[in-house]
Image (cartoon, rainbow, N blue to C red):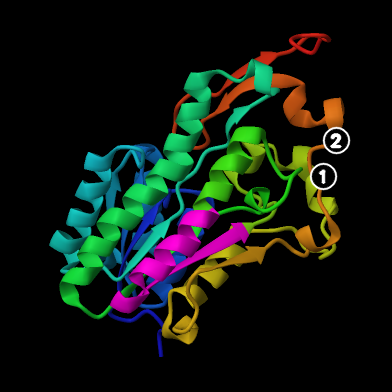
Amino acid sequence: MKRLAGKVAIVTGGASGMGRATVMRFLSEGAKVVVADLNEANGKETLAVAKAQGHDDAIAFIRCDVAKESDVDATVAEAEKRFGRLDIAYLNAGVGGAFGPIAETSVEDWDYTFAVLTRSVFLGMKHASLAMKKHGDGGVILVTASIAGMIGGGGSHAYSAAKAACISLIDNVAAELGPDRIRVVGIAPGVISTPLVHRGRPEKYEKQFAQQPWPDRGEPEHIADVAAFLCSDDARFITGETIKVDGGLLAQGVALWGTGQDNTFMKSAGVNRGTTGEAMVVRTLQPGDNRK
């Protein structure tokens, strides 16, 4: 039996990487899915892939800026209009965000990072929970967190702080929504081979993949497998939990990007806008820049 049969799901950032892999897994498990993404070209491609696999009537796409409340509200409304209800909200959309030394990080890039990674989760939880309460039999809110939010050395300052905030939200909102039978859970990926990480050059990140104890590279499908489990009734007694899916990376300690001034994030500054279709900004730093 398909584990998500009859369920209606939203997947933000669902047009590429872990999001797209999870969309395909949800569809294969019997769910109807609304793909929400800022990148319309990737969205159309995802629809084409799904329809080629025979899921014509079970998928829809909506362009969504997850940092805007009106867009998030409209995405939830689209799921209800198209498929009648909402059972699962996978709040997955993300970007690399601001990177570089603290002194080189602009307020605008910091705020952008938190808007996409943290405000979006708040908005998704808010509007998804309202929709789930309407039909009275609960639901699941799943969040893509990160091991970077659990320990130092896993990402840039801004990204790590934003993901740590998401993990705290998972804990606190799970306690609030438990009586409504709405489970709130998270996945904390390690290094996963997605366009957000490698930006079309996976070979550039072999060093990061090689640091994990498990010999296989992290792939989007590994995240999709865990997402399908957490959103199914097999996980019906799990809430307020963020599960590491990192090939044992965090178990052995992590300094993925180097240490001190040799950290990759210290050699340049800017903002990574992920697969949104918007341009990445990078400034190469010269020795001594704001490091006195």
Is 29 placed above or below 184 here? below
Question: What amino acid is found at the position of numbered circle 1 in the picture?
Answer: Ala
Q: Which residue is drawn at 71% across and 14% down?
A: 284
Left or right of 139 on screen, residue 278: right
**Highlighted magenta segment, given as a residue range:** 167-188
Residue nearer the viewer, 164 or 12: 164
Q: Which residue is drawn at 31% across and 42% down?
A: 64
Task: Name the secondary structure under disc 2.
Answer: loop
Q: Residue at x 79, y 13 (%)?
A: 291
- Residue 77's tag is none
Instruction: Quadrant for the C terminus, please.
Output: top right
Instruction: Quadrant for the N terminus, please.
Output: bottom left
Residue nearer the viewer, 13 or 169: 169
- Residue 255's tag is 1
Is 84 placed above or below 191 here? below
On the image, the x and y values in percent for residue 198 come to: 66, 40
On the image, the x and y values in percent for residue 290 come to: 74, 10
Residue 48 seen in the figure: no
Q: Are marks 1 and 2 in contact (CB under 8 Å)?
A: yes
Residue nearer the viewer, 81 or 160: 160
In which quadrant of the rendered view does residue 154 lie? top right
Report the residue marked by disc 2: 259
Question: What amino acid is found at the position of numbered circle 2 in the picture?
Answer: Thr
Task: Name the secondary structure under disc 1.
Answer: loop
